[in-house]
Image (spheres, rainbow, N blue to C red):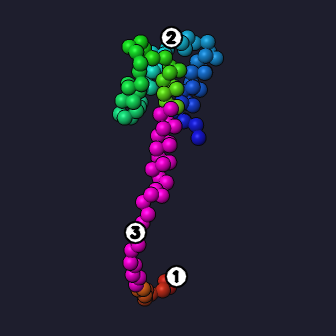
Amino acid sequence: MPFEPKLTTNECVSSLKILERPVEQLDDKLVFLLVQKLDQDSRRQWDLSLESDDPPKFESFMDFLEQRARALVNHETSKSKPSTTNKPTAMSSTSSHVKINSPSCPV
């Protein structure tokens, strides 16, 4: 499943390129606007990923987004899988049967 924000952003940038707009000069603005849309933890991860004080390129940010989305999906997938190391302990079970006499619907 592709990461939707990345797809939408790339479509917009591609459209600007088709219109022969100077997209390369928008890197700083695009990255700034997109970083503002990140959740707090992703923004922190983005800050940690920066290797220099130079303004990051749009392409670098999109690569980060793809890696981050992949990591989050993998994390959620592993979280939802039952653990094979933790076997449930045997529990005694009891069951009860209750019969409820309810009036039937006249309609």
Q: Is residue 86 magenta?
A: yes
Q: Residue at x 45, y 17 (%)?
A: 56
The N terminus is located in which quarter?
top right
Q: Give the residue type that dot 2 points to.
A: Gln
Q: Which residue is mark 1?
A: 107
- In front: mark 3 or mark 2? 3
Q: Residue at x 40, y 69 (%)?
A: 89
In the image, taking residue 45 as reference, residue 58 lies left or right, namely right
Q: Which residue is mark 3?
A: 89
Q: Residue at x 41, y 21 (%)?
A: 50
Q: Secondary structure at mark 3?
A: loop
Ranked by sequence position, the earlier of labels 2 and 1 is: 2
Q: What distance separates the C-alpha of mark 3 from that of mark 2? A: 61 Å
Answer above or below: position of 5 versus 12: below
| Proximity of marks 1 and 3: CB atoms separated by less than 8 Å | no
Front residue of 105 and 40: 40
Q: Is residue 11 magenta?
A: no
